[in-house]
Image (cartoon, grey):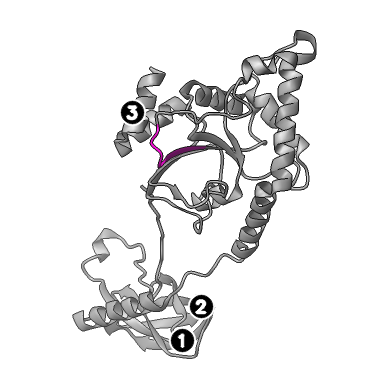
Amino acid sequence: MRRLWHKLTIAAVAITVPAMASGDAATTRPAFIDTPDACYQVERQMGESVYLKAVGSCEGKPGRAFITSKLDTVKIFVEGLLWKEMKAQSLSIPDVEVSLKKAEELGTSITIPTNASEIKMKEAAERTNVVYQSPEFQGRLKAEAERIKLALFGDAVEQYYPDSGNPAPIQGKLGADERIYVFVSSSMPIQTIRNYAASIARYGDPRIMMVLRGFVGGVGKIQPTIDLVGRVVQRNPACNPVKEGECEILPVPFGVDPLLFRRYGIDRVPAVVYARGVKAEDAGLSEGDDKNAIIGEFWKAFGDASLEYIVEQMQRDSDSQGLLQLVDSSR
C-alpha cells in the first residue's frame, strides 16, 4: 500500500535545555525571556548569559524564548552583542497552553514549498512519452524488432514466432488488474539487468515488465536502447547469431516510460513495484498517466535483491493470490 512519510517541523518557540550538573537540577527552573523579534531563538546559554540568533525572516514583532535558569536576572546577547539585562519570568501553565495554541495556528498556515524542478520534470517526462507512443516511433521499434528476429533466427523465424502475424493473448498468473514493474537503468551492471530478465522470463507473465526511464543516449536516439534490450534478452550473451545462426531470446516485455517512474516515486534503481486495481482507459497509453489509468494500491521495494525474493515478500504483505501463484511456480 502506498505509504507517504512527510516530516514537518514547526519552530514556533525555541526550548533550550543547557547542560548542567546533577546537583544544580533542583535549583533550576523553567522561565521565558523577551526577544527583540519573534525570529530569535536561543542559541546557547552560559550561566547568566543567554545568546540569541535569528532563524528565518524577522518581521519586527517582539517575541519570547524559553530558558532554564537558577538566576533571577540574565543578560541577553543578540548576534553576539549585549541587548539588555532582564529578569527571567516564571513559566506557568497558561504560558504553555498559549504557546501550544500558537504552534497549532502556525501549523495550519505553513505550506511545503513546491519543488522548483517539478514542472520541468513533468514536461520532460511527457515529451518522452509522446515520442515513445507516437506511430512513427512505434513503427521504428517494430521494424527493429523484426530486424533483430531475422538476424537471430534467419529463415527459421516462423518456427520460433509462428503467431507473429496475429499473436494470441498470453495467459499469465497475475490478474487483469495486477502489474509488476521492474525499474532499471542502463547505468546498472548489465548482469544485474540480465538476472531480472531471466526471472521475468521464468515467470512467463505478460503483466510483468521491465521499465526504463528514458532512451539510452537521449530521446532522439533509438539504436542504443535497441542494443541494450538485445544484450539483456539474449539468453546466452556469448551467442553470435552471425556464426551460430540462431540465439535463444528471453520473452521479456520492455517499456520506456518516465511517467511510471514519476507515478510510483522511483528515484533510484533497481526498484520493483507490485500494483493492483490498475484500470486503463486506453491500453496504448502509459499506465503512469493518472489521466489514463487509475490504481488501487501498490507495494514497492528498492535494492539489488532477486525478483523471486521480492515477489515472495510482497505476497506476504499483500496476500495476493496472483503473487502466490508466481511464488509457487518459482518453487
Q: Position of residue 134 (x, y in %)?
A: 69, 49
Residue found 76% across the figure and 27% down from its top:
147
Q: Tell me which numbered mark, 2 or 1, is placed earlier along the sequence.
A: 1
Identify the residue position indicated by label 1 in the image.
Answer: 37
In the rendered view, would you say 189 is above or below 234?
below
Residue found 31% across the figure and 74% down from its top:
69
- The three-letter code of the residue at mark 1 reads Asp
Identify the residue position indicated by label 2 in the image.
Answer: 54
Q: Which mark is residue 211?
A: none
Q: Which residue, as the protein is rendered here, is positioned at the far right?
A: 242
Q: Is the Cβ of the residue at disc 2 closer than 8 Å to that at disc 1?
A: yes
Q: Position of residue 255 (x, y in %)?
A: 60, 39
- The three-letter code of the residue at mark 2 reads Ala
Q: Which residue, as the protein is rendered here, is positioned at the far top?
A: 244
| Residue 90 relative to residue 235: left or right | left
Determine the image quadrant of residue 146.
top right
Instruction: Tell me the crowding category of disc 1: few under 14, some 14 to 19, or many 20 or more residues within 10 angstroms, Cα based.
Output: some
Structural distance between the alpha carbons of marks 2 and 3: 57 Å
Q: Which residues are magenta?
A: 174-181
Q: Position of residue 167 (x, y in %)?
A: 57, 29
Give SS at disc 2. Answer: strand
Residue found 44% across the figure and 82% down from its top:
76
- The three-letter code of the residue at mark 3 reads Leu
Instruction: Tell me the crowding category of disc 3: few under 14, some 14 to 19, or many 20 or more residues within 10 angstroms, Cα based.
Output: some
Q: Is the Cβ of the residue at disc 2 closer than 8 Å to that at disc 3?
A: no
Identify the residue position indicated by label 3 in the image.
Answer: 324
Give SS at disc 1. Answer: loop
180 falls in the magenta region: yes
Q: Tell me which numbered mark, 3 or 1, is placed earlier along the sequence.
A: 1
Q: Position of residue 136 (x, y in %)?
A: 74, 46
